Image (cartoon, rainbow, N blue to C red):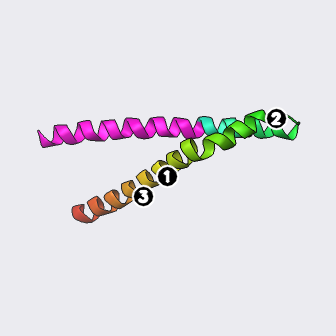
């Protein structure tokens, strides 16, 4: 039963992180697109990206790197336990 709950918890967390990764990929593509348009004189898309930076992309980046750090710590602890 405990293994099943852990599996459901891990799947839910993995789904959140996958959606978070999609946000980061789409955001980076949008940044590249808006930067190209900004160089050509149309800065409306770049201004929108700047408005979305703090409420969307900073939390998404923080969640992404925090998840990587926690996963690395958990994996190192599990490896120590198995050895």
**Residue drawn at x 22%, y 42% as measured from the top left:** 6
Specify whether residue 15 is in view: yes
Of the two numbered discs 2 and 1 on the same chain, state the one appearing first in sequence.
Answer: 2
Assign a secondary structure to mark 2.
Answer: helix
Asked if residue 49 lies left or right of residue 2, the reply is right
Q: Which residues are magenta?
A: 1-25
Along the line of sight, which residue is nearer the eye, 20 or 38? 38
Along the line of sight, which residue is nearer the eye, 50 or 64? 50
Check the image and name the residue furthest to the left.
1
Percent from the top left, x then y, of residue 46?
74, 39
Asked if residue 30 lies left or right of residue 77, the reply is right
Residue 69's disc is 3
Residue 48 covered by magenta stretch: no
Assign a secondary structure to mark 3.
Answer: helix
Residue 37's disc is 2
* Mark toward the viewer: 1 or 3: 1
Neighbor class of circle 2 (other Cα within 10 Å; few <14, some 14-19, many 20+) is some
**Residue matched to label 1:** 62
Asked if the residue under mark 2 is in contact with the one under mark 3, i.e. CB atoms within 8 Å, the reply is no
* Mark toward the viewer: 3 or 2: 2
Of the two numbered discs 3 and 2 on the same chain, state the one appearing first in sequence.
Answer: 2
Cα–Cα gap, marks 3 and 2: 35 Å
Neighbor class of circle 3 (other Cα within 10 Å; few <14, some 14-19, many 20+) is few
**Residue drawn at x 17%, y 42% as measured from the top left:** 3
């Amino acid at each position: 039963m405990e293994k099943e709950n852990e599996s459901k918890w891990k799947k839910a967390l993995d789904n959140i992180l996958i959606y978070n990764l999609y946000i980061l990929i789409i955001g980076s593509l949008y940044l590249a697109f808006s930067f190209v348009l900004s160089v050509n004189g149309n800065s409306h898309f770049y201004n929108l990206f700047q408005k979305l930076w703090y409420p969307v992309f900073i939390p998404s980046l923080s969640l992404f790197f925090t998840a990587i750090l926690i996963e690395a710590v958990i994996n190192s602890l599990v490896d120590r336990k198995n050895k």
